[in-house]
Amino acid sequence: MNSITKSLLALMLVTGLTACKKDEIKDDIDSAPIVDSSTAPDVTTAAVDPRNHTDVRNLDNPESLLSKRVIYFDYDQSTVRAEFRPVVQAHAAFVAANSSASVTLEGHADERGSREYNLALGERRGNSVSGLFSAQGVRGSQMNVVSYGEERPICRETSDSCWGSNRRVEIVYTAR
Amino acid sequence: MNKQLICERSRISRLLVGLSLSLFGLLFLVQNSYAKLEIEILEGVSGAIPIAIVPLKWEATTPPPSTLPNTVVSADLYRSGLFSPLPAEDIIATPANGDEIRFAAWQALKNDYIVVGKISGDVVDGYEVSFELFDIHTQQRLLARVFPVKPGDLRHAAHRIADAVYERIIGTPGAFATRIAYVTATGTGDNIEFQLMVADADGFSPQAIATSPEPLMSPAWSPDGNRIAYVSFEKGNSAVYIQNILTGSRQLISSFKGINGAPSFSPDGHRLAVSLSKSGNSEIYLHTLGSSEFTRLTNHWSIDTEPVWDSNGHYIYFTSDRAGRPQIYRIKVTGGNPERISWEGDYNARASISPRNNKIAMVQGSKNRYRIAIQDLENNRLIVVTNGILDESPSFAPNGSMILYASKENGKGVLLAVSVDGRVKQRLVLSEGDVREPAWSPIIQ
């Protein structure tokens, strides 16, 4: 690799650091909930109830289910597992209660098998989540399912755990 | 508005990354033109046919290229696995025509066949190539051809010689003067660059015909070898395009809500089969090129995808999980009830049909092992021809002799080829990036 390529790579790294990554999963403890102190000077100390799934502040509250945005699936399956139902229900409650909110449900598959079948499988997973959203009153216009199949893996190793982390639906807010 | 809100969909970061990627892409393209696919034989056939490819006598008025055509012919025949060309250092004489061949000497070197010839003309107006193939034992001339070659087409001329020799001796057409398309992914994390590549069948002259920071998938050749249909996510969702590889012009074919995938040209080149999920789940549709019509062919709540035409244009083979797991089915292009084709194993997908419609190659999986299997459609016997862990995307050579497929080695996507009997294996090595989804072109006239 020549030096120009290296410096370009460095530039890309820098831009990547200053901007947010698309696939970033927002459940890290370091990112504190954002509270706008100028509009609510006296209630900043009042903690948000993390169980209030209609409060926009909980989307960034690591204590709240709303801060979790990834649903994982079994091999070649698209049923939302029981352990992820509360997360799906929390987001469905939020989107249903906030008519200006909208989400893209990004469906993904692991690398095993054929790519186009996996594209369809990723969509089926997205549809599975959108079906649960609909059941909780989310309007069709507030959600959009996009499948990336196996083309956007989180993890690139050939192992069960890695495959598990790639079989997912990411709930991406396009408006809050 | 807070930072989180802007970052949620991160359009800005995508723009920045996109900008730096396109800059990087320019540089990469320059570098990549030097990176070539190299082919190595993994397993060969014992008893390959010994043949001497004598350097063609250079009578042209301009200096010869660095790689002489005879070298290319030898390499082609070698990698077919069926021939064992005499090493260059053992070529004892350079006869340019039949009269100059001392057959006894070549027979002593244990050769069965010999190719001789010459090249005249020049690099400006083009060349004239003539060659002859002899059976050394009977001293019989099996082949004699003279043909014009455009400047810069000497490698292609060599592939044509190899095709003719292969066909005369083996009895089926060669597929050396063909091309392959494939997708590469270079980089990590969000900084991945996808490229749709086209190269000669021996891996030389790779060219990027499309580059994108978003996934590219499923290249499929038109029957005339001039166009490639593929899937691009450049608009955020999958969309099907057809690109002319000679002119670079490109046409958007479908970008409906949901999946737009798995394009496949009809044998007459007038129609495209695609998989669309605009109805709610993926179904096979037929589209007449130039029209705006998409006619639905399948109708089932399951996944129906990966349509491919048989060479008569009578049937579409496709993958469906209507019986619970993915299996290969076929349906008449006029519609009707699909008929299940694959029965062995609980995961069969991504069919490729042999040119004579008598075999289908497919990805056969068990839970952690995916290999390429070939089912003989005449007796329904099935053989597994590869032994990888994650083998996928089989594509028949246009002469039906080999199957090109993708696999994963040391975490990196690689291309491999295997003969239809499973005996000859080759690896096509690309120096960098993840290589996947090979598609072998038709025989280009």
Image (cartoon, coloured by chain):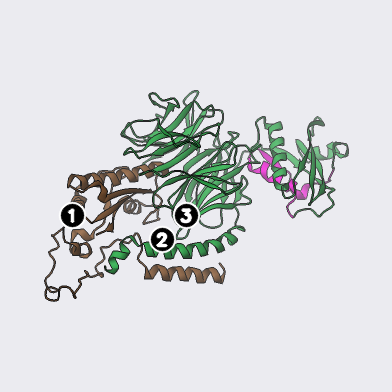
Residue tagged 1: A90
Whether labels 3 and 2 share one chain: yes
Callout 1 amino acid: Ala
Mark 1 vs mark 3, foreground winner is: 1
Q: Is residue A125 left or right of residue B224?
A: left
Colour representing chain A: brown
Identify the chain drawn in green: B
Query: How packed is label 2: few (under 14 Cα within 10 Å), some, or many (20 or more)?
Result: some
Callout 2 amino acid: Asp
Callout 3: chain: B
Give the mark, 3 or 2, whose residue is nearer the N terminus: 2
Q: In the image, is residue B69 part of the stretch drawn in magenta?
A: yes
Q: CA distance from mark 1 to mark 2?
A: 28 Å
Q: CA distance from mark 3 to mark 2?
A: 21 Å
Callout 1: SS: helix
Query: How packed is label 3: few (under 14 Cα within 10 Å), some, or many (20 or more)?
Result: few
Residue tagged 2: B190
Q: CA distance from mark 1 to mark 3?
A: 41 Å
Query: How packed is label 1: few (under 14 Cα within 10 Å), some, or many (20 or more)?
Result: many
Whether labels 1 and 2 share one chain: no
For the point 44% across and 54% down, the residue is B214
In contact (CB < 8 Å): disc 1 and disc 3:
no
- Residue range highlighted in magenta: B66-95
For the point 52% across and 39% down, the residue is B395
Dividing the picture into quarters, in which one does residue B305 lie?
top left
Callout 3 amino acid: Asn
In contact (CB < 8 Å): disc 3 and disc 2:
no
Q: In the image, is residue B274 part of the stretch drawn in magenta?
A: no
Callout 2: SS: loop
Query: Is residue A114 at all visible to an observer of this figure?
Result: no
